[in-house]
Amino acid sequence: MNSKYYVAVITAFSIWGFFSVVLKSLEAFTAFDILSYRTLGSVVIMLFVSLLLRPKALKANLDLFKGLGQLDKRRIIIVNILSGLFLALNWYIYIYVMNNVSVSATSLAYLICPILTMVLAYAILKEKLFKLQWVAVALSLTGCLMLSLGNLTDLFYSMIIALTYALYLVLQRKNQEMDRFLVLTCQVFFAVLFLLPFIVTYDSPNEKTPFFYGMLALIAVVFTIIPMFLNIYALRGLNSSVVGVFIYLNPLINFMFAIFYFDEKVSFLEAICYFLILVSIVIFNFSAIKNRINRRRAAHI
């Protein structure tokens, strides 16, 4: 039964839908300030949990890794290093765009991301998409293209954010052997290693306040560790294309905040585009559920 994986992925992307509220409260600080403390705070907490609170899981996974063949070892190392790189890029660009471009641009990124994830999963992982799911892809693509009209700058940033996270998601389907929390710890650790030269040499223009540190602790735990763990967990039981389509929850929640909380003006055309995307989510998942039910019926005949 895949219901627990669906609950995990829905929870993860719903949490990220509220991230804009937290980030907007920190817009006086630079994107790199937020990113560096987010990654450092996350990796310290995760290393503490992995090394001190889960020593048995750590030992078991080290033994498992030692028992793998050289090709599998190399694949796991490369996949997790690349995952760390894509996370670092995704987080930095997302924070920068949120506080320096617009909330709508980040929403557009995670509207484009599911399309890229589905196409990459189909092209790289050979994951099958049903005919009705291709209709959903076409609908969501139409909505995204309509949203990008007259906003080429937003589209440019959105494409980079979307591509980095889509590549991260697809990589996780090739990253199944090890403990989920340890995998995430390694990925965030590699992200810190990529950022470390910049963190050491960066001269922040902002004075840090207790509010800043409190919000970054909240971001590290609630908006980084928990949803990332749930995301990796969901990918153990669901295809990348299925997980990818739930990314739409993030921008749909963002869209609501942009209208009702941040008072960003939304045109009738934008509302139509978001409606098309919402319809595509229903169609995509209806197709997947229908085919799963048909397979179960066939198995009992």
Image (cartoon, helix red, strand yellow):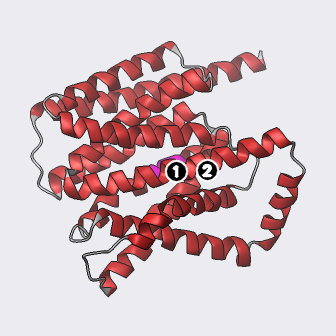
Seen from this angle, which residue lies furthest bottom? Answer: 210
Helix, strand or loop under label 1:
helix
Spot occupied by residue 291 in the image (x, y as percentages of width and height): 59, 20
Determine whether 87 is above or below 243 in the image. below
Determine whether 54 is above or below 110 in the image. below
Q: For the residues labelled 2 and 1, say whether their Cβ atoms are less than 8 Å apart.
A: yes
Spot occupied by residue 183 in the image (x, y as percentages of width and height): 67, 56
Can you see residue 221?
A: no
Which residue range is magenta in the image? 9-13
**The C terminus - image quarter:** top right
Seen from this angle, which residue lies furthest right? Answer: 67
Viewer-proximal residue, 159 or 284?
159
Q: Mark 2 Cα within 10 Å, few/some/many (few <14, many 20+)?
A: many
Residue at the spot x=26%, y=52% of the render? 97
Determine whether 165 is above or below 215 in the image. above
Can you see residue 274?
A: yes
Viewer-proximal residue, 183 or 5?
183
Q: Which residue is mark 1?
A: 85
Viewer-proximal residue, 73 or 276?
73
Helix, strand or loop under label 2:
helix
What kind of residue is marked 2? Ile
What kind of residue is marked 1? Leu
Residue at the spot x=21%, y=31% of the render? 148
Quadrant of res 181: bottom right
Residue at the spot x=29%, y=56% of the render? 96
Is residue 283 magenta-colored? no
**The N terminus - image quarter:** top right
Majority secondary structure of magenta residues: helix
Q: Which residue is mark 2?
A: 81
**C-alpha distance separating marks 2 and 1:** 6 Å
Quadrant of res 261: bottom left
